Amino acid sequence: MVDYIPERFAPESADTEQEAQDWLDGKPGARRPPELLTRDVVARAIKAEVEAGRGSPKGGAFLDIASRRDAAFIKRKLPSMYHQFKELAEVDITAEAMQVGPTLHYFMGGIRVNAETQMTKVPGLFACGECAAGLHGANRLGGNSLSDLIVFGKLAGDGAKAYIDELSNSPKADDDQIKSIFRGGTSVLNRESGENPYVLHDELQDLMGQHVGIVRTGEELEQGIEKLGALKAKVANVKAHGASQYNPGWHEAIALNSLMITSEAVAKAAHMREESRGAHTRIDFEGERDEWLKYNVVIDRADDGSMRVRKEERPAPTGYLEEIARAKIDDLESGKVGASAPED
């Protein structure tokens, strides 16, 4: 990893294996191992090693804990990891290295919500957690997901209550809309023949992995978007066998529509953002571009029902938020950043 340390993190990262070991041993002044850099940096490093022919037998990289700590320490500190590898992969991480590889971990962005209430543009619909907003910017640090849910789940709950309290009368459902949704959901059961939902899921997964992976190019993204368009016709003709009770094939067929929408949105947003930032890497646009720091990529539905993508300039952050965004890791961990935090 010492060969893949970004310039901006170089002052904070160990540049030799010995210094990294010194940090693990608690030696004062030793800098953090580069393996603890953000996920996108580590993922790109693994991918580069694999493409250079230095990957592990299964197309990843070796993560070696066994040679760094004794078995009792590993079992005490990493009980779930020890159990998962032992039971699912038959690998004893206290005795041998693990094979690991990068994949999608978390969505950086989501449904637009009001910052205070978490209500979406659809009145009465609230969102929080991974599906909402974009709290973590271009990269989420480990351990933040649960706190995200707790904090913004509370805001969403309060926002929903306030919304209900302000209603003058009870909302009435649109019966025609309900019937239309019901017919759409059951049509995959009632048609005589059609595409296998599991096969289509595999096709979509392979398509996204090949064209919208962790490292992207404009050409690959364009090909992926084109292939997604062709796959839509198959998804529209999907067939689930059996009845509606306890039918995972039916659930798979219904979920495909949402998967297609999400995949198209990710691909088109990645194609529009012509820079590399955090977990979004474009080989044809390396490095962060100051221009793109000013914009969010917004996806919505056009009048003809197609997916529309556009750049939207966002308001300038407050001084406190900008201070956090530009802070070094050591300052954040030490608590030096935050002196100008608002009281509320």
Image (cartoon, helix red, strand yellow):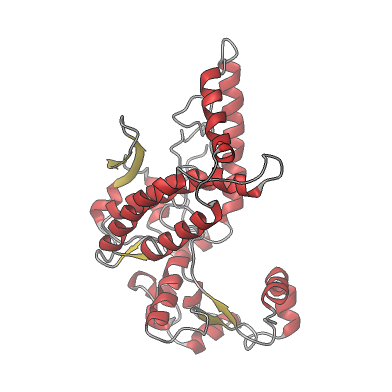
Nearer to the camera, 82 or 244: 244
Q: Residue furthest top?
A: 168
Q: Residue at x 48, y 41 (%)?
A: 342
Quick check: 293 left or right of 119? left
Residue 181 or residue 24, whichever sits in front: 181
The reply, left or right, for residue 123 in relation to residue 303 is right
Residue 330: image x %, image y %?
A: 47, 66
Expressed as whole percent of the image width and height from the top left, the position of residue 283 reads 28, 68
Write the residue at 26% across / 60% down.
218
Q: Quadrant of residue 99?
A: bottom right
Judge whether residue 236 can be spotted in this image.
yes
Residue 303 is drawn in which quadrant? top left
Residue 197 on image: x %, y %: 54, 51
At 71% across and 40% down in the image, what residue appears? Answer: 245
Q: Is residue 278 left or right of residue 258?
A: left
Left or right position of 294 against 25 = left
Q: Position of residue 124 (x, y in %)?
A: 53, 25
